[in-house]
Amino acid sequence: MAAALLANVLYSTGFVLEKRALTTMPSVSVRNPARLLRQVLGSPLWIGGSLALAAGFGAQLAVYRTLPIAAAQGIFVSGLVLLLLLSSVLLGERTSGRERYAVAAILLALLMVVLSLNEENDTVSRGAPVALVLTVCLPSLAAGLWLYGAAERRAKHRHRMPSAGVEYGVAVGLLYGVSSLAIKGVSSHLTTQGIGGALVDLLRSPYPYLLLFTGAFGLIMSQAALQRCRASLIVPVCTTVTALFTAVLGTLAFGEALPDDPVRLALRIAGTVLAVSVLLAMPKHDGPPPQS
């Protein structure tokens, strides 16, 4: 639990620091990743944010070794409250009433998922069939890249209202969902005994390569999206998609069984449906800026 809460603080701080650094940079683009990397690596503030995110990754590894996937995601999403507070104080971003209601509904949905857990019966899986992991991950990566590209093409149309960031958030969330499953897979290979053999087994698995791919593309895509859209909207959407993806598909892929109790099963299903419904209902565009 302590590691999960620490991960929340590190991730929220990291995203806000990166967003603040990006606001002072020239426009970045996924079409020129080398230029994007030169710009962000030249910013001490951005580097501080990325180090916070990297530390959050380390905390996440510890969480996945001790908590079921669904429970971990429920705790991670609670960090949205801290993210909204930091984005308001440090970035001056204001969320609309509709968006605040949406975030509250998302937190309620994930609370329902957490309440569906049973410490006595829930088990922490240590592995998953490679074929099943790839069947889940590869189409999700393709969908995330396609959705991001589609959002980029629509954003170029003239006279189009500025995007609120929902499409970008969903696209990046899919990549980070795959990354989260890869982190879970890496954690299952970590051991204090037979380190050499564990390392060989890890390198033979798809997890380090999924992490490299999602890390590289997720970095480029998320930085461009953060620069164009409000962190107070895009990060909650991204976090929710990642959490749902990991909790639902990760639970199935790693064989962490669904609740036997009808009430707990209903809570888990209802929480998932509520979160997806909120995402579908969120505004796709920001309104025009107020007239001075």
Image (cartoon, rainbow, N blue to C red):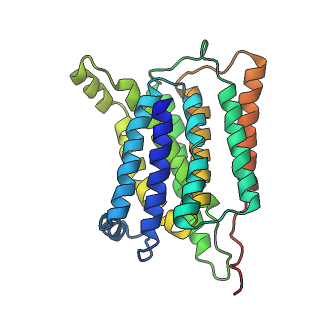
Location of residue 85 with respect to 268 vertically, above or below: below
Q: Tell me if 77 is positioned left or right of 133 in this view.
A: right
Q: Kindly tell me whether residue 43 is visible in this rendering.
A: yes
**Residue at 60% across, 41% down:** 78
**Residue at 47% across, 71% down:** 23
Q: Kindly tell me whether residue 138 is visible in this rendering.
A: no
Q: Residue furthest left?
A: 196
Location of residue 106 with respect to 246 vertically, above or below: below
Q: Residue furthest front?
A: 89
Q: Nearer the viewer, residue 64 or 156?
A: 64
Position in image of residue 156 (x %, y %): 58, 76
**Residue at 60% across, 59% down:** 232
Position in image of residue 15 (x %, y %): 47, 55
Q: Tell me if 197 is positioned left or right of 5 in this view.
A: left
Position in image of residue 132 (x %, y %): 51, 29
Q: Quadrant of the C terminus?
A: bottom right
- Callout count: 0
Location of residue 143 with respect to 3 vertically, above or below: below
